Amino acid sequence: MESIWESRSFGREQDLVVVGAGITGLFTALHYGRAYPRRRVLVLERGPHPSGASVKNAGFACFGSPSELLRDIDTEGEAAALHRVEERWRGLTELRETLGDAAIGYEAVGGYEFFATDSPLYTCVAQRFDALNTALHGIFKGTVFTWADRRTAVLGLPPGHLAWNPLEGAVDSGMLMRALLAKVQGEGVDVRFNAPVEAWEDHASGVELQLAGGAAVKAARAVIATNGYTRRLVPGTDILPGRGQVVLTSPIPGLKLKGTFHLDEGYFYFRHYQGRVLLGGGRHLDKPGETTTEEATTPKVQEALEELLRNTILPGRDFSIEKRWSGIMGFRTHGGPPVVEHLSPNVVVAAGLGGIGVAIGIRVAQQAAGLVG
Ligand SMILES: Cc1cc2nc3c(=O)[nH]c(=O)nc-3n(C[C@H](O)[C@H](O)[C@H](O)COP(=O)(O)OP(=O)(O)OC[C@H]3O[C@@H](n4cnc5c(N)ncnc54)[C@H](O)[C@@H]3O)c2cc1C
């Protein structure tokens, strides 16, 4: 019983449907809409607002800590790892230009990797530190990482080693996603919330997407940008979910910590946030258990996070945990870059952004919009 107004303005077949209103899905819709201004673009999001990793993350505007980059070089090879760093760096620049620093709460605070005094990881990184800087020189045209051990006291950290990266920053992920959503909608893209897609089929004439509740949406093409949730719609994909747990402390009077901090190849990360400490990670402590799409916290990881706060980040300080949450990332089974590829003639998947998706989301979206266009 659709009226003529409904079917003309809301019910017509779409030119592109994007599944997932995270940073990747929304930027895909934005890029596609800009490339084809007359085409109808609809984003379908299961949650009442963007509800994936893009609104659960730690808000690091980063491209990788020294130990994380060295691990990537060892597992993927130098050329592939450096290409990804370049994509992240370009992505951060484009993100800031597109949405504006004020709108995303960008803070140019710089980032650090912290190593305990007796850390074996420090020894490995120190040996390859200059070689890493040399390898990155082609991208940044200067030295990225320097040692800043003396700053541990200024930052209220115990004695240890600090690798400093002045190019890293922090964003407010809520502000970022609100600004992106407003831009996308302002440029004529429709976004439908509470619309979980349960299945899709690519007929020769176009794509049909089944929503929970029985409704269907038809489109000429579709992009699946569901990151850690992709297995539900693409059962054979090599993208696995990876849960990240986060804690936020109560306000800490006179908090000295300022900046974004990485630990243990990026498996732990912490930063200041409005006089508090935000700390996340610990997925490596229970990889099988954290390979899940269930949004929950577990005693094992939460205890490890609290111990890190007590012993390393806020030694001797009183604090309580004000908030705990988790989010779902998407990782390739054997590591490596995000997947942007055709699943069928009219359907593209853009997912598997891993732990550094804030930076690379806009670049993955450009590829997806180009491929589906
Ligand atoms: C705890 C945590 C900390 C992180 N910290 C950082 C950080 O500091 N810096 C950084 O760069 N990266 C960080 N990341 C990673 C980064 O957040 C992600 O890589 C990035 O947000 C991925 O964006 P996306 O749009 O691809 O996925 P998502 O943001 O997950 O978006 C996917 C969307 O699809 C929707 N969806 C799923 N299934 C369906 C369906 N069937 N139908 C309709 N909609 C569906 C979801 O609700 C979601 O909104 C972190 C991630 C987590 C979880």
Image (tube, grey):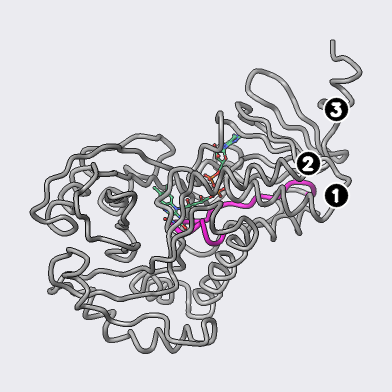
For mark 2, does the 10 Å Cα neighbourhood hold few (<14), some (14 to 19), or many (20 or more) residues?
some
Residue beneath the point at 34% across and 63% down: 259
Query: Eyeballing the image, is 154 above or below 235?
Result: below
Q: CA distance from mark 2 to mark 3?
A: 12 Å
* Residue 55 numbered tag: none
Among numbered discs 2 and 1, the one appearing first in the sequence:
1
Q: Nearer the viewer, residue 213 or 29?
A: 29
Describe residue 189's horizontal placement relative to residue 298 as left or right: right
- Give the residue number, with chain letter if any, for mark 3: 9
Instruction: Look at the image and tell me in which quarter the C terminus lies.
Output: bottom right
The dot on residue 188 is 2
Which residue is nearer to you in this view: 336 or 243? 243
Which residue is nearer to you in this view: 177 or 84? 177
Badge 2 element: loop
Q: Residue furthest left?
A: 316
Question: Which of pointers 2 and 3 lies earlier in the amino acid sequence?
Answer: 3
Query: Which residue matches tag 1?
Result: 37
Question: Which residue is situated farthest in the front direction here?
Answer: 254
Quadrant showing the N terminus: top right
- Label 1, ligand 1: CB separation under 8 Å: no
Q: State the image quarter where residue 10 is shown.
A: top right
- Name the amino acid, label 3: Ser
Q: Are marks 2 and 1 in contact (CB under 8 Å)?
A: yes
Q: Position of residue 7 (x, y in %)?
A: 87, 22
The stretch in magenta equals 345-360
Instruction: Give the amino acid at mark 1.
Output: Pro
Number of numbered tags placed on the structure image? 3
* Label whose residue precedes the other's in the sequence (3 or 1): 3
Give x and y (percent) for residue 362: 62, 58
Give the Cα distance between marks 3 and 1.
Answer: 16 Å
Regarding mark 3 in the picture, which secondary structure is present there?
A: helix
